[in-house]
């Protein structure tokens, strides 16, 4: 199965967010410990290899004196644009470098690894499929307080920077439409990363619900819907929260 076929199946196949899972996705029971982003039970996850926990080995730290972040990111993104598995690169201006590989659907960092990442670092990773940033990606950027998060895939390079108020501005409830509040209300008092994840997951779900009937009626192909979902998911949240979102053709 090609990467394109796989992502179409994930977004618009019958196994993605099936009957009743919409509620389970945003249920408080799902927001426990560090396993916030898992919408499926262990039994369900076993049927969906792309959503299993990553098989990443320990990441590699390095310090190169002066950090050539822009150059390092450009080289990394060129090398990994068409890669079959995800890989993460983190850098900052002081020379901090962290690199870790995962599987075709995820990369897992340990708490110890995350604790060593300086605030304000820049992160880049690749997606083997033509999707946008995932809710997990945005929780990761928030938890690590990245100054920029980047994602490269066959279609191009996508970048996000937080606004002046950070990834989750203090006035976020005044920025986000009321329809998001039932979901976000279930996470009252949760860490910023959890709230960002919930907002992104909610919008992604709404976009998918809008596009699925078009696929089912034949008005839009799955590949067209996948790319339409890209523009209707994370960029919408970016607009609400003041993130700087850019798409770059490579």
Image (cartoon, helix red, strand yellow):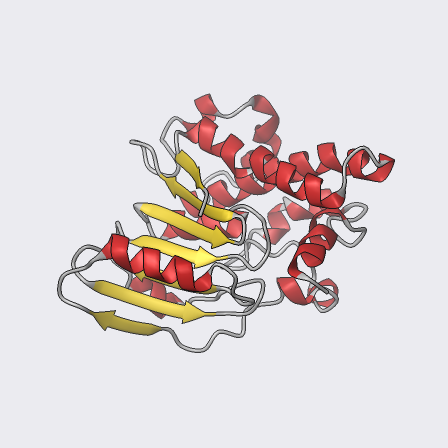
Q: Is residue 187 above or below residue 100?
A: above
Residue 164 in picture, x, y percent from top left: 29, 31
Q: Is residue 192 above or below residue 241?
A: below
Quarter the N terminus occupies: bottom right
Q: Nearer the viewer, residue 111 or 122?
A: 122
Name the residue located 74 percent from the left edge and 63 percent from the top edge.
44
**Residue 182 occupies quadrant:** top right
Q: Is residue 23 visible?
A: no
Residue 208 in picture, x, y percent from top left: 69, 39
Residue 77 in picture, x, y percent from top left: 40, 58
Q: Nearer the viewer, residue 162 or 248?
A: 248
| Number of marks in picture | 0
Q: Residue furthest front?
A: 250
Residue 56 located left or right of residue 123: right
Q: Nearer the viewer, residue 110 or 148?
A: 148
Q: Residue furthest right?
A: 217
**Residue 178 occupies quadrant:** top right
Q: Is residue 111 visible?
A: yes
Q: Is residue 137 above or below residue 76?
A: above
Residue 178 located left or right of residue 7: left
Residue 220 located left or right of residue 168: right
**Residue 125 occupies quadrant:** bottom left
Q: Is residue 156 above or below residue 53?
A: above
Name the residue located 39 percent from the left edge and 29 percent from the top edge.
242
Name the residue located 56 percent from the left edge and 54 percent from the top edge.
37
């Amino acid at each position: 199965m090609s990467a394109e076929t796989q992502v179409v199946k994930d977004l618009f196949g019958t196994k993605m967010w099936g009957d009743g899972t919409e509620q389970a996705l945003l249920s408080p029971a799902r927001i426990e410990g560090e396993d916030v982003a898992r919408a499926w039970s262990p039994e369900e996850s076993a049927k969906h290899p792309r959503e299993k926990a990553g098989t990443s080995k320990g990441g590699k730290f390095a310090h190169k004196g002066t950090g050539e972040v822009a150059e390092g990111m450009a080289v990394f993104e060129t090398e990994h644009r068409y890669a079959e598995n995800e890989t993460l690169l983190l850098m900052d201006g002081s020379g901090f470098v962290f690199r870790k590989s995962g599987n075709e659907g995820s990369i897992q960092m340990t708490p110890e690894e995350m604790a060593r990442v300086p605030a304000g670092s820049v992160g880049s990773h690749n997606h083997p499929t033509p999707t946008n940033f995932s809710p997990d990606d945005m929780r990761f950027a928030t938890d690590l307080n990245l100054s920029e998060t980047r994602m490269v895939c066959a279609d191009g390079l996508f970048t996000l920077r937080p606004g002046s108020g950070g990834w989750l501005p203090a006035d976020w409830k005044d920025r986000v439409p009321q329809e998001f509040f039932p979901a976000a209300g279930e996470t009252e008092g949760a860490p910023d990363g959890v709230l960002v994840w919930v907002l992104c997951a909610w919008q992604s779900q709404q976009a998918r619900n809008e596009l699925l009937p078009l696929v089912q009626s034949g008005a839009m192909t799955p590949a067209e819907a996948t790319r339409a979902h890209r523009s209707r998911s994370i960029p919408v949240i970016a607009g609400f929260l003041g993130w700087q979102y850019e798409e770059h053709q490579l």
